[in-house]
């Protein structure tokens, strides 16, 4: 049951993450994602079998929570940027920022739904009750899922967004060497997530962001 209400919000979140990369790239002068039909919330063009389905399910089954997920990266040509370094940082940063914004949107949805509980109960319908509880659990999961995705993508190890931000700041020669880590970096991240000290730091940051959001829910719901 937990998997059922996590999957839709997970797919939506990783799709929004990638679409925002493409949208900001377009605003910075690069229309590649637009021409490739990737500026759409339709999940089909964005789904990566490995990163959008298999890895999240594996982490859910093994660790009991999703902490790694990604969609197919939108195609971006930084040579089209108006200001290479500035725009590279903006395009990279907007993905994690969009996830943190989605966490707030999910919190708002939870507050609205909890305040409407009496209205939904008035239908005296098992189906309506099931749908209501499904939505509450889905959006509540969306809060933590998006915070995790946002913080995870800010880790400065390739190919995550945080690495693109860092490489845009580094001197050119050092930046080029740093980028050579490439996709192998994801295995470094997976290893680090298994290291207790790193995992503790990671989820401490997640909890630090989630705590004020939980406070808002408790106050207004």
Image: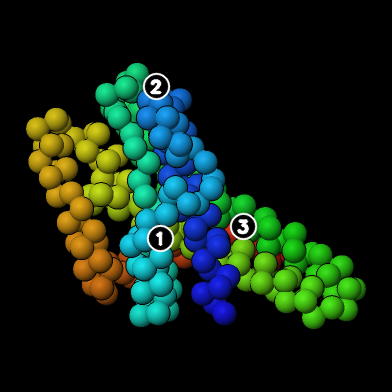
Q: Residue at x 37, y 41 (%)?
A: 74
Mark 2 or mark 1: which is in front? Answer: 1
Mark 3 neighbour class, 10 Å CA radius: few under 14, some 14 to 19, many 20 or more: many
The residue closer to the viewer here, 177 or 135, is 135
Quote the CA–CA distance across marks 3 and 1. 20 Å
What is the image's colouring? rainbow
Residues tagged 3 and 1 counted as in contact (Cβ below 8 A) = no
Indicate the secondary structure of the residue bearing disc 1.
helix
Q: Residue at x 39, y 21 (%)?
A: 29
Q: Position of residue 10 (x, y in %)?
A: 50, 61
Which quarter shows the C terminus?
bottom right
Indicate the secondary structure of the residue bearing disc 2.
loop
Q: Residue furthest top?
A: 82
Q: Is residue 44 visible?
A: yes
Q: Which mark is residue 29?
A: 2
Residue at mark 3: 106
The residue closer to the viewer here, 44 or 164, is 44
Q: Answer with mark 2 or mark 1, whichever residue precedes in sequence.
A: 2
The answer to whether 50 appears left or right of 129 in the picture is left
The residue closer to the viewer here, 107 or 28, is 28
Which quarter shows the N terminus?
bottom right
Q: Residue at x 19, y 62 (%)?
A: 188
Q: Position of residue 175 (x, y in %)?
A: 15, 37
Q: Is residue 211 visible?
A: no
Q: Answer with mark 3 or mark 1, whichever residue precedes in sequence.
A: 1
Q: Position of residue 4 (x, y in %)?
A: 56, 73
Mark 3 or mark 1: which is in front? Answer: 1
Residue at mark 1: 52
The answer to whether 207 appears left or right of 78 in the picture is right
């Amino acid at each position: 049951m937990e998997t059922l209400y996590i999957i839709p919000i997970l797919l939506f979140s990783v799709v929004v993450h990638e679409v925002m990369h493409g949208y900001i790239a377009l605003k910075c002068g690069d229309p590649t994602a637009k021409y490739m039909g990737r500026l759409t919330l339709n999940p089909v063009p964005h789904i990566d079998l490995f990163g959008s389905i298999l890895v999240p399910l594996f982490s859910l089954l093994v660790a009991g929570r999703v902490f790694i997920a990604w969609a197919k990266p939108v195609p971006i040509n930084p040579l089209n940027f108006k200001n290479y370094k500035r725009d590279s940082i903006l395009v990279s940063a907007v993905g994690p920022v969009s996830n943190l914004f989605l966490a707030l949107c999910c919190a708002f949805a939870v507050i609205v739904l909890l305040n409407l509980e009496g209205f939904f109960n008035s239908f005296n319908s098992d189906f309506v009750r099931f749908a209501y509880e499904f939505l509450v659990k889905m959006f509540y999961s969306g809060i933590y899922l998006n915070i995790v995705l946002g913080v995870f993508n800010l880790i400065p190890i390739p190919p995550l967004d945080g690495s693109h931000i860092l490489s845009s700041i580094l001197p050119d020669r050092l930046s080029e060497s740093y980028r050579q880590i490439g996709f192998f970096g994801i295995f470094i991240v997976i290893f680090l997530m298994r290291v207790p000290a790193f995992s503790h730091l990671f989820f401490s940051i997640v909890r630090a962001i989630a705590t004020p959001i939980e406070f808002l829910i408790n106050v207004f719901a």
